Amino acid sequence: MNIQIKNKTNLIDFLNENNIDISEWGKQGHKSIDNLLGELHEKDCIIKTEVIREISIAVVNIENKGKLLFEESQKMKNGFIRQRNKLPREKIKQNEEVIEAAYRCLKEEINLEVEDFTIIKVCETPKVYTKVSASYPNLKTRYLHYDIFVSTDKLPNENFTTKENGEEHDPVDIHYWAWVTKNNIKK
């Protein structure tokens, strides 16, 4: 069953009642309680009664000359540099299609317009795993990864940066991108 969170106090009370220590949240690059509240209000995630955060993610695979686009790190709005070492990705909102999240990722994080790329394949079956969230210490999260394969000739051949063009509550300011060989990628 999904938990309905009305406000910040309600969220903090719920986490405390379920022994989720939030003392590290909002520090040293971890997301804050306000970020989680924003994710809930924007329908980026849900909280389950078993106290598990569940996120569906569109993982965008962009290939160029045998290499994949890889996000090395992000500069947060507060100046903190967060290591990512992942393929481009975007949370899939509730009632949103995988392809819509992929479009948002390409637009908001990589600054590509619809006419700048071609969707080659969308994997309908997710890869599922559960672990404690790196963004929210002590909060168990179930991840459902959907791979999307894209081609484009509109990106630089060398490493590059882009400015985040997303939602107001998003703490990211700058994305740092690199092209890496497929066997060096952590999805």
Image (spheres, rainbow, N blue to C red):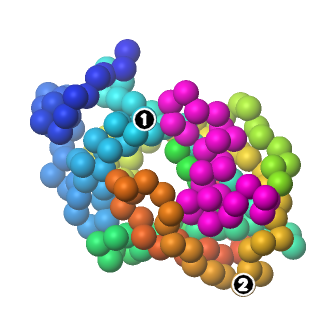
**Camera-side mark, 2 or 1:** 1
Q: CA distance from mark 2 to mark 1?
A: 35 Å
Quadrant into which the N terminus falls? top left
Q: Which mark is residue 179?
A: none
Is residue 48 in the magenta section? Answer: no
**Closer to the N terminus: mark 2 or mark 1?**
1
The residue furthest bottom is 158
- Where, by quadrant of the figure, is residue 147 drawn? top right
Q: Is residue 179 visible?
A: yes
- Residue 135 picture location, percent across and down: 36, 53
Residue at the spot of label 2: 158
Could you say where residue 22 lies in the image, as x and y percent from the top left? 19, 47
Amino acid bearing label 2: Glu
Q: Vertically, is 14 above or below 107?
A: above
Q: Is residue 116 left or right of residue 21?
A: right
User: Is residue 116 shown in magenta?
Assistant: yes
The quadrant holding residue 41 is top left
**Mark 2 crowdedness (10 Å alpha carbons): few <14, some 14-19, many ≥20:** few
**Which residue reaches farthest top?**
1
Quadrant including the C terminus: bottom right
- Residue at 51% of width from left, 36% of height from top? 93
Q: Residue visible at 50% across and 30% down? A: 94
Number of callouts? 2
Q: Which residue is mark 1?
A: 43
Three-letter code, disc 1: Lys
Give the magenta part as a residue range.
92-117
Q: Residue 150 in the image: state x and y as whole percent.
A: 79, 55
- What x and y, as percent, mark residue 47? 35, 29
